[in-house]
Amino acid sequence: MASPKRPDATPSGTQGAGPGGGRRRLTRTGLRCAALGALGLLVVGSTVSAGPRAPALHASPPPAARPCALRAVPGVAMSEGFPDDSSRGPGAEFAPSTGTVRALTLLIDFPDAPAPYSAAERYGEFFPAVKKWYAVSSYGRLNYESTPVLRYIRMPRPFTAYGIGRGYGWDAHTEMMRDLLRVADHDIDFSGYDILNILVTPNAGPPADEAVLSVTWTGASAATTDDGAHLDKVSLIYGHDQSGPRVLSHENGHALGLPDLYAADDFPRTDRLAGQWDSMSLDWGLQGDLFTWHKWKLGWIDDRQIACVTGRTDATYTLRADEVRGGLKAIVVPYSRTGVFVLEARQQLGNDRDACRAGVLAYRVRTDVDSGKGPVTVVDAHPHTSACDFSSGAFNSLNDAPFAVGQSYTDPAAQLTFTVLGRTAAGEWRIHVTRR
């Protein structure tokens, strides 16, 4: 349970709000990027990055010892590059991604949509599953602590009064947050948390298979409590999502700084981008973990676990699977100031226990491409086939993307050729890489 508000707390004058076929991801085809209002908020898929940002990301190159860790590109929505260290923590754009991250989890309902079952049941849809997902994906480097208030907070106005719809804007969000504080700030202490989760009663709004409303807002504060806590990293979950608890893992991934990997403006194109290989792409996919690039970016993998190839090479590397602690995790080849080619190994373990294929996964990362525009593109080792078609009515062409033993590929942009030579007795993957 959340700690109670100190008895001497005094409300401030900041709390009044103005008046006011199957697979769920097929409903996201209408998502778009849009500039909203005087704050210049950028809505990208299920992520809202609000300005002004604090602090700004630096454009300086990475240290010489980390030439493959490309920097985030200023002005790019949730760039795939590495952010400056000052972009994490209290008052910064993103929450801490290592150590303990503290989430306050609230449940809300509305006069026109009272909760159909208990707060404990709704909370149980996500926890302890989300905590376990982060522990497994981060190899124990992220300790996710959720503090719940196990009762529904009744919002003061009907759900329909807020104008919540797909891609809803900053004004609607700030109205909701200010109304939330009107009814909750007097007895809930919002201070000391890195993330605010709001689990909305699932009967508020359309079902998730008709409209995807779940969203994360980060980068600016929608409201401030009487104790000075800012609601600046907020994930809201609506409906009963097909991905179950992983929808919250996905949304909290934005609070940690990860972009959407699906194509927001042309959703079917997702099957030519990252497919089901990362939960920031299709969070209901068979492959439920994160790319090694994301794990390195979040600090879950050390620099020494990355083979950075910046010049000529003719060498053999042994990769341990992304799902297993330790070992060499990826071969990274920068081919421009904003692009890298990555090789990693995936197996049917941990968060990928339902994966369609094991093998060596190859993909390109672009740091100059906005969230929701396709910053990661997987190379398909079997471009003429799909696999595990039971997993989705579409989006299956990349399920058999990993390269198997004996397969080779040449990437002209990165000027490299690799061949999967075999597997060791321990199950690691031996890969020969040539770059001229």
Image (tube, helix red, strand yellow):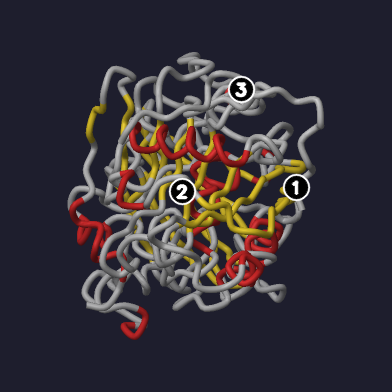
- Neighbourhood count class around disc 3 (C-alpha, 10 Å): few under 14, some 14–19, many 20 upward: many
How far is mark 3 from mark 1, CA to CA?
21 Å
Q: Name the residue under label 3.
A: 91
Name the quarter where the C terminus is drawn: top left
Say which quarter of the image contains residue 67: top right
Q: Name the residue under label 1.
A: 2
Residue at the far bottom in the pictured view? 390
**Residue 369 makes an appearance in the image:** no
Mark linked to residue 342? 2
Which residue is painted at 66% across and 52% down in the image?
328
- Neighbourhood count class around disc 2 (C-alpha, 10 Å): few under 14, some 14–19, many 20 upward: many
* Residue 330 or residue 118, whichever sits in front: 118
Name the spot of residue 88 as percent of width and height, x first: 62, 28
Q: Earlier in the sequence, mark 3 or mark 2?
A: 3
Say which quarter of the image contains residue 185: top right
Tell whether 131 sits left or right of 330.
Answer: right
Tell whether 163 sits left or right of 15.
Answer: left
Looking at the picture, which amino acid does disc 3 mark? Gly
Secondary structure under tag 2 reads strand
Which residue is painted at 76% across and 36% down in the image?
5
Which residue is painted at 69% across and 62% down in the image?
136
Which residue is painted at 67% across and 35% down in the image?
186
